[in-house]
Amino acid sequence: MTKKKMPAKKKPSSPSSHRHTHGQGQCLDLLRQLSAFIDDELPSDICREIRRHLGACPNCEDFIASLQHTVALCRHRPVPPLTLADRMKMRRTILDAANAR
Amino acid sequence: MRTIAPQRPARQESDKFDRLYRDHVGLMYRYAYRLCGEAESAKDLVQETFLNAYRGLKDFRGEAQVSTWLYTIASRACIRMRRKRKGQPEHELSIEEFVPTSEGEFRLQIPMEGLNPEEALQNKELRQALDQAIEKLPHKYRMALVLRDMEGLSAKEVGAIMGVNERAVKSRLHRARLFVRRELSARGITHHDDHKSGGLRS
């Protein structure tokens, strides 16, 4: 995949056209709350505020997308299955160890 | 008429263990594999877990779900085994270290566009990067991530298993996700067509 093209600078759509210095202020506040936002654990007024910020800040929008992708990948990380032979061998080892007390 | 003789306690205990093992060994192996990152250590951890469960079975009163009880035993066993190996000391992750310092860092992406997670994970490079990122996580953060995002437990359940409150679980989970995100996106993995031809690693 090629990297996303950097979109042309947008004007902040929020009426409060804050000076957008990333890593500070609103972006930093957002960064602290992103997991709670993704997990739907925040009160609705804070969620609204965050959505408004995301609409005005492509950097934060990209950041949150990459965090959501991270969570999705973790959720689907494959695990090789345990074979029947291993299952039986482990059971024998456990019972031998338990009876060796 | 023949009467059925009552089972002897040792036999009852053994039957109970067999049921426990049969019903939960798959779940515990999956958890152990996710924590350890490879099969042999995972099997050691599963054996340690069920050995401890066998010994504690007669005292288990069923206040917690059986699976939660087993997750707790496995998590403690994992910590003990790790201490024995005397690995590198744990370090704390602070939010500040994940604050992007440039626009480029903010906008680093993970190659998933247009793919669902299963398809994206067919990309061997991405899969290996994910495994390595999780392996690099300090233990307490990895455990929170595995229990919450991979095993799908609630923050409350994870807190009970790890012996911390929900707030601590959420804080560890958030830092763990930020860590993995940074590791994955900073690798500059490019999307290619592995998902069309390759199967999952066995």
Image (spheres, coloured by chain):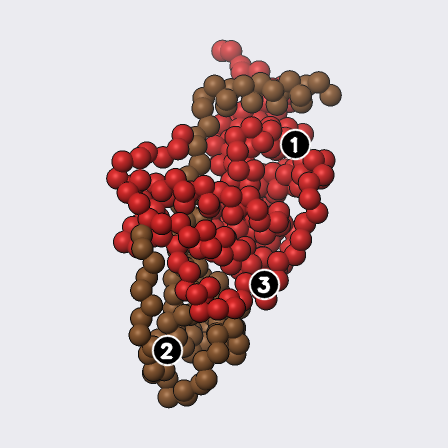
Chain colours: A brown, B red
The disc placed on residue A100 is: none
Query: Spatial distance from mark 1 to mark 3, Cα to Cα?
Result: 39 Å
Q: In the picture shown, does residue A43 fall above or below B95?
A: below
Letter of the chain that mark 3 sits on in the rendering: B
Q: Secondary structure at mark 1?
A: helix
Which one is in front, A91 or B38?
Answer: B38
Q: How many C-alpha atoms fall within 10 Å of the one at disc 3: few (<14), some, or many (≥20)? A: few
Q: In the picture shown, does residue A53 fall above or below A93?
A: below
Query: Spatial distance from mark 2 to mark 1, Cα to Cα?
Result: 54 Å
Q: Position of residue B9 (x, y in %)?
A: 64, 22
| Residue occupied by mark 2 | A56
* Residue under the image location 44 percent in, 36 percent down: A79
Letter of the chain that mark 2 sits on in the rendering: A
Q: Secondary structure at mark 3?
A: helix
Q: Position of residue B150 (x, y in %)?
A: 47, 47
| Residue occupied by mark 3 | B97
Q: Position of residue A32 (x, y in %)?
A: 53, 68
First along the sequence among labels 1 and 3 = 1
Task: Say whether residue B58 is visible.
Answer: no
* Residue under the image location 38 percent in, 62 percent down: A65
Foreground label between 1 and 3: 3
Circle 1: residue type = Asn
Q: Is B199 displayed left or right of B178 in the figure?
A: left
